[in-house]
Amino acid sequence: MSSKHVTSFKGITGWIDQRLPIFTLMQNEYGSFPTPRNFNYLWNFGAISLFMLLLMIGSGVVLAMHYTADTHLSFNSVERLMRDVNYGWLLRYMHMNGASMFFLAVYIHLFRGMYYGSYKEPRELLWILGVLILFLMIATAFMGYVLPWGQMSFWAATVITNLMSAIPLVGDPIVTWLWGGFSVDNPTLTRFYALHYLLPFVIFGVVFLHIAALHVCGSNNPLGIEPKSEKDTLPFHPYYTMKDTFGLCVFLMLYAVFIFWMPNALGHPDNSIPANPMMTPPHIVPEWYFLPFYAILRSFTIDIGIPFTHIVLISSKLGGVILMVTSIAVGFVLPWLDTSPVRSARFRPLYRIFFWVFVADSILLGYLGSQPPEGIYVIISQIAMAYYFAHFFLVIPLLSKYEKPLPVPKSIHEAIGSGA
Amino acid sequence: MRLILSLLATLVFALPAAAKEMHPHGPEGGWKHKGVFGSYDRGALQRGLLVYKQVCAACHALNLVAYRNLAMLGYSEDEIKTIAAEKRVKDGPNDQGEMFDRPARPSDPFVAPFANDQAARVANGGALPPDLSLIIKARHGGENYVYSLLTGFGETPPADMKILPGMNYNPYFPGGQIAMPPPLAADDLVSYSDGTKATKEQMAKDVVQFLAWAAEPHMEQRKRIGIRVMLFLLVLTGVFYAAKRQLWRDVH
Ligand code: HEM
């Protein structure tokens, strides 16, 4: 054997590791992996997100054993699971509220990255993979929500797939192709089911790359400076395995409150009514984690065309779709919009303020997404939407240029020693 | 900053709760089955079943509930057999290839009043009485809404509202006019065997609790397990917190 790898493990573990160094890999990546010693609790949300992904896959696989994808049977198959399968209600409420908790964790994880500049050199690709995961999660959760075939399932599917019709020329054929017919119907449901089963595993693959990229450049930290010596780091295990487990337990308690005491609080009552294509609900609203994007989608209310003609270049619908996709895709270019050499908002007095304004704006958009698109709400949505994009395309580039950052500490252990 | 984050989380979760209709309210004293430890009142469930069977079942189905589920209300097997046998269902085909009528069995779902939606509409002036299995989960306001709806008939409509033929004024129903005639228009529509006086409010309160059970039959088990899970997580959190403190003692 010409293998250069010599295992440090003994016995059976050593025999395996010599031939397939998974134990060495685990040891390097999760055991002794040098990790900045100054993480705060916001650094728990990566591990929590991964836990939630695995939990969604686990609960989903068992749900799938009881679920039937058929417009006449889906609603009742889910109810049968809730009523007649042992702990079926638990399984379903875990999955249903798990989606919300997954998004909550990922959103905190992502805002953490924005606050501490984790998307900057050398972590651009790591960040981009994260944005890709968010896109995949959105698609997965959207299709999952269609499966129980309640009123909101059906009408959300109708509204969202209809958006494709905004694409010029090929829009309508694309919608027909997506539906597998001329309206949202059985073929739509079965393909959504197939994709809902598939996509989480794709997410898992991208998460693997995301973590692989992380382990090449190492973690960022609240100071935003690279660790320079061993004094700045700790081995991942046991220090962070222990801290992450503690954080996860706290998170699970919040999750448990929803599962056991308010399992339907985050859902919509209309999804307890079987889908009825003949009856449109008075308000079609998505799940809370989509509300900001929904508000952006609806904020574009004019057709842009060639003046003095009837030629419409960008219909209000197409405009809304473009804005909505851009509002997430902007993440792909964020590393190049923010050219400030300082990562952490701790040393960026102005960025720090604008960061919180941006968070408030996103929450405002979420609120607006839950309201009917009428009267004053339309105008506020437009302002909030404009600010959302201004944050990325104006505020961040301008701050990169003109903000005077505070002095950055020389090393992590010095900063901790001096009580920063 | 942690504080701000937790505030934000609370805000985000509070948002979708907003409702719009005329404020529904519960009965005096609230609902016994709500709250962290709340459990169903068996007496109320049995009385509610009676109201459902003798009043609502003339128009509304309860498809997702089977007679056997009534064991949760405290009925014995024989009592359930008797309750089921009050109704007849179509079964078959038998060895002769014929469909036949038989009394309902505990394993059957509650027998629906109409053969299909169309028949239900014809009998109700074009309006469809919805299946009540999930009604408490399927309306904003849940129990309070259905209670208010049931007790909200009989008021005079505002002068500018024209009540259409076959419709009834009810300020809690979206639009203010409902095709359901007041189902609990008088006291004593049923006679309770436990001596409770069957006022309109009492019947409404009982049937709403019965329907809450029908929508969430496992609510008690859910909370019971929830409490155990919470205690377990609390201990686990404590243990990991202590371990983490111990481990990190020399690091800070
Ligand atoms: C990224 C991870 C996942 C997310 C975010 C997600 C999200 C969702 C959501 C929001 C629902 C609707 C819940 C409801 O209202 O009842 C749902 C339903 C469902 N999901 Fe998933 N899911 C994930 C993974 C999976 C996986 C891996 C499977 C199968 C292997 C699966 C199988 C199902 C089934 C069968 C249903 C229908 C039953 C039901 O509605 O409760 N899910 N999912």
Image (spheres, coloured by chain):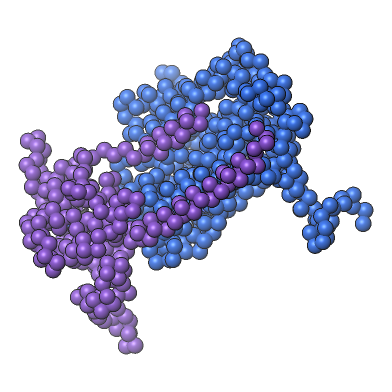
Q: Residue furthest bottom?
A: B96
Q: Is residue B225 visible?
A: yes
Judge from the rendering whether residue A11 lies leftward or rightward of residue B36; answer left or right: right
Of A347 and B124, nearer the camera is A347
Where on the picture, by quarter, is residue A212? Answer: top right
Q: Quadrant of the N terminus of chain A?
A: bottom right
Q: Colour of chain B?
A: purple
In the image, residue B23 lies at what x, y percent? 21, 40
Q: Residue at x 39, y 66 (%)?
A: A84
Where on the picture, by quarter, is residue A223? Answer: top right
Q: Quadrant of the C terminus of chain A?
A: top right
Of A176 and A64, nearer the camera is A64
Judge from the rendering whether residue A30 lies leftward or rightward of residue B50; answer left or right: right
Vertical side of B112 occupied by A326: above or below:
above
Vertical side of A409 occupied by B83: above or below:
below
Judge from the rendering whether residue A267 lies leftward or rightward of residue A6; answer left or right: left
In the image, residue A228 lies at what x, y percent? 76, 28
In the image, residue A313 lies at what x, y percent? 48, 27
Where on the picture, by quarter, is residue B73? Answer: bottom left
In the image, residue A54 lies at what x, y percent? 58, 51
Q: Chain in blue?
A: A
Q: Residue at x 29, y 75 (%)?
A: B106
Of A234 and B105, nearer the camera is A234
Q: Is residue A317 visible?
A: no
Q: Residue at x 65, y 32 (%)?
A: B252
Q: Residue at x 70, y 27 (%)?
A: A413
